[in-house]
Each structure stands twice: as C-alpha cells, then as structure tokens.
Image (cartoon, helix red, strand yellow):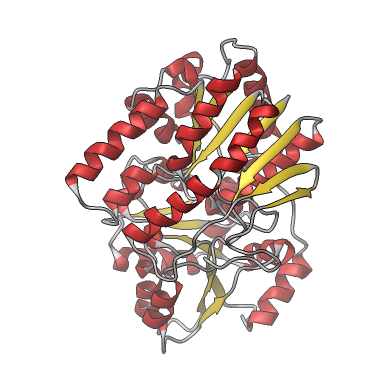
C-alpha cells in the first residue's frame, strides 16, 4: 500500500505524539508499504529547531525506509493561545505546496494526525481529489483542550472551531483515537461508529538490565534505600506540573524520598522556579532511548499529574512507558475517566488539584515496598495485554487494508460493542 502520513512532529528521537507517528511509519515501511511523511523540522518538545535543520527550509530526506518531506514552521519564543494558532497555521500553509506535489503519487490512504486539526482540510481534499481514503487520528482534542485550558476564550471562536471540527470528522473514512473515552467522544461529535476505531499508543516491552537501573540511580546520587519518584515527559500546560513542586514541598522532610523531573517544554521554567530551594529535587533534560529506559527502571514511583479539565480530552503518551517499566503510578485524574480506569489497576488515583492527597499517595507507596511491587507488576501485565507494539500496529495495518478495500473494519466501534470498555477494571 501507498500511505501518506501528514503530521506536525516526526523524528526518530522524539517522545510523545511524534514518537508514535515515527514508529508507525517505520514499522509500516519495514513491512513493505511505501510510506511518505509530510512534517515540520524536528522541534518538539523543546520548542527549538533540531540540529542540522532550519525553521524556514523545505527539505526531503530518507529515514529508515521512510520518505520524509519537511515544510517550514514558525516557532514562537513564548507560548500563548494566539501564538500557538499562528504556529500551527504556519505549518498548515507552508505544507500546502508539498501536499500538492503528492497529487502525482496517489496514496491509497492519507493518514492525518491531530494536532494540528488545521492540516486536516487540505489532507482530506487531497484524498478526495485522488480517490484515496482519508483517516484522521486524534492524539489530543486540541479544540476542546484549548478552551478548557483557557488558551482560547472567545465564544464566537469556540462556536466556529467546534463546527469546523464536526464538519471534518464526518468526512473521514476512518477516525481513530487513543482511548475508549476519546473514541466515544468522536462518535458524539458525529462520527459513525462503523468508522471509529481504537488505536492506542503502544510500548515496546523489554527488561532493562538491573545494573543499568542501578548505574542510573548512582549517577543521580539516589541512595539504595531511598525511594525515587519520577516525572518524565513533556512539561506543558495540560500536565498539571504544579502538583509536582507542591508534593516535593509537602514531603521536604522525608529524607528517604527523592524527586527527579525529566523533560522539556513551556512549563519547565515555572516548575524549576517553584521547586527552587527544595531538597532532593533534581531536573534532567530529555534523555536518549537507552538512558530513558534506564531512568524509568531506576524509579520506584512514577508521577502522572493531569489537569481535571482535560482528563478525557487527552491520554498521556508517557503512561505507556510507565506501565511497561513495572513501577506503580500516582496520577491525578477525574473519577471514571479513561486515565483513572487504567491507573486504578496499577497505582493510586487522586483528585486533580488536591496537592495534599497527591503527596500522601506518594508517601504511602514509599512506605510500602510490597504494594509498590504488586501494583507495578499489575501495570506491566496490563501493558502486555493492551499495549504491546507489534500487536497494536498489526491491528492498525489490518484496518488500513480494510479502509483501502472499502470493507467494514472488524475493529470498528459498532463491531466491538462493549470491547471499548475492556480498558476498565
């Protein structure tokens, strides 16, 4: 099959959304499919153009069997709702000439990733012009999240954006998302259940050598008897990072609990300021793959703060690595959300905004090694059952073939019925 992937973030070293798109493309190429990708230069999550690239450069390159076409993007120095819209618009506009060149190629499926939704109109139009199938994959409901987080506030803009979103969703041959709740929301927004499928973020399950985890702890200066509470991932507006510094402050007298906050993003500087002067708190930049795996294994507890107003609009991609590491998770999530359903099986869920409860949950797990081991093992079993990479991507490949052949997909929401609820306890 010929597959065109239209996305903002694409690079082998990325984390989060870009990581999954990259692995999808490379996996499909290794299976013999002809894969092209239209993307911006690597910049996320540091919000800085990667080495060897320029923001305003068109470029074509071949990476691990994938034909990658780069289009310019504007990177704002400071984040705001308006600047983010302009950032997304810059790529949506600059990528149009590259997209037009694909008319001669005629992909079987045009696979678009949201965010950014701004690219979906042109990608959908291309699919219609060439008789291709249009597939929109939703990693984040960016319209809902932008208003929930207060990045955008104007009622008229919300009215316009919501109707624009529904118009696009109804014109896709497939719509997928990463959690049952997010698939259900797509259906609420007008997508036919026969066209909506679950495509979760996945993980590669492997065992990190104990000596690599021990070496990482030694490098960080974490005593063998101490408990390491780790946050590793993007540091942005929807993460609820204030819970991290608040917990570290509330537990500052617990000399056996160490905190490591690893990652980058627009909220890192604020988190560092809030954590200034707190004992046993360290910050790390993004790590390469091997060091990242060692860091996950070195932790005793994973921290997953999330704001209540976006709990069912996003499913944190970092959760997959946490579960695969076999360590328990302490998360903030709204009751009955998809995130709470998963984490309740392998950790502790507290209400968003309750810093004291977040700190108490960390302290309780720090005091109970046996419970940590049990919850961590449960999380790894859950990952093996639901998130193993080859199983997820094999189902994805089958769905690609089904939509291309214009037959009903066995993975569609109306075929699976209550199967969407299998993520629950």
Task: Give how far across and how far down residue 137 sits, in percent.
Answer: 51, 35
Please report the residue visible at 44 percent of the width from the left and 21 percent of the height from the top: 418
Q: Which of the 4 image quarters holds residue 183? A: top left
- Residue 413, compared with residue 73, is above or below; it is above
Task: Give how far across and how far down residue 257 sits, in percent.
Answer: 50, 77
Seen as rendered, the residue at the extreme top is: 407
Please report the residue visible at 60 percent of the width from the left and 51 percent of the height from the top: 71
Left or right position of 112 against 53:
left
Task: Give how far across and how far down residue 338 sits, in percent.
Answer: 41, 40
- Residue 104, compared with residue 247, is above or below; it is above
Pick the front one: 85 or 401: 85
Position of the C terminus, as image quadrant, is: top left
Q: Which of the 4 image quarters holds residue 218? A: bottom right
Please report the residue visible at 55 percent of the width from the left and 60 percent of the height from the top: 44
Position of the N terminus, as image quadrant, is: top right
Seen as rendered, the residue at the extreme left is: 155
Q: Which of the 4 image quarters holds residue 78? A: bottom left
- Residue 221, compared with residue 306, is above or below; it is below
Pick the front one: 17 or 332: 17
Please report the residue visible at 59 percent of the width from the left and 17 percent of the height from the top: 131
Left or right position of 331 against 289:
left
Q: Is residue 203 visible?
A: no
Q: Is residue 340 visible?
A: yes
């Amino acid at each position: 099959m010929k597959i065109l992937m239209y996305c903002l973030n694409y690079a082998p070293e990325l984390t989060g959304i870009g990581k999954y798109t990259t692995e999808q493309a490379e996996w499909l190429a290794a299976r013999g499919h002809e894969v092209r990708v239209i993307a911006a230069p690597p910049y996320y999550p540091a919000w800085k153009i990667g080495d060897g690239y320029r923001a305003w450069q068109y470029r074509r390159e071949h990476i691990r069997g994938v034909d990658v076409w780069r289009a310019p993007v504007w990177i704002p120095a400071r984040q705001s709702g308006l600047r983010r819209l302009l950032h997304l618009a810059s790529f949506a506009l600059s990528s149009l000439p590259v997209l037009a060149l694909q008319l001669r190629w005629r992909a079987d499926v045009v696979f678009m990733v949201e965010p950014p939704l701004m690219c979906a109109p042109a990608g959908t139009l291309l699919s219609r012009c060439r008789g291709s199938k249009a597939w929109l994959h939703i990693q984040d409901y960016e319209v809902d999240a932008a208003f929930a987080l207060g990045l955008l506030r104007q009622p008229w803009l919300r009215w316009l954006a919501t109707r624009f979103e529904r118009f696009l969703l109804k014109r896709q041959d497939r719509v997928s998302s990463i959690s049952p709740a997010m698939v259900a929301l797509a259906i609420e927004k007008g997508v036919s259940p026969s066209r909506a499928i679950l495509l979760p973020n996945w993980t590669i399950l492997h065992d990190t050598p104990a000596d690599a985890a021990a070496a990482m702890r030694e490098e960080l200066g974490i005593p063998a008897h101490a408990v390491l509470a780790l946050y590793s991932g993007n540091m942005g507006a929807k993460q609820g990072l204030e819970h991290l510094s608040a917990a570290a402050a509330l537990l500052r007298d617990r000399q056996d609990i160490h905190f490591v906050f690893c990652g980058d993003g627009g909220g890192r500087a604020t988190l560092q300021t809030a954590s200034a002067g707190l004992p046993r708190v360290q910050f790390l930049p993004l790590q390469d793959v091997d060091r990242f795996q060692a860091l996950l294994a070195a932790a005793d507890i994973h921290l997953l703060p999330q704001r209540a107003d976006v709990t069912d609009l996003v499913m944190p991609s970092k959760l997959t690595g946490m579960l695969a590491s076999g360590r328990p998770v302490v998360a903030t999530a709204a009751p009955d959300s998809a995130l709470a359903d998963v984490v309740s099986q392998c950790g502790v869920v507290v209400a968003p905004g309750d810093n004291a409860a977040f700190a108490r949950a960390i302290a309780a797990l720090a005091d109970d090694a046996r419970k940590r081991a049990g919850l961590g093992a449960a999380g790894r079993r859950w990952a093996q059952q639901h998130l193993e990479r080859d199983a997820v991507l094999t189902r994805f490949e089958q769905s690609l073939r089904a939509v291309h052949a214009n037959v009903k997909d066995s993975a569609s929401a109306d075929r699976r019925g209550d199967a969407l609820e299998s993520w629950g306890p």
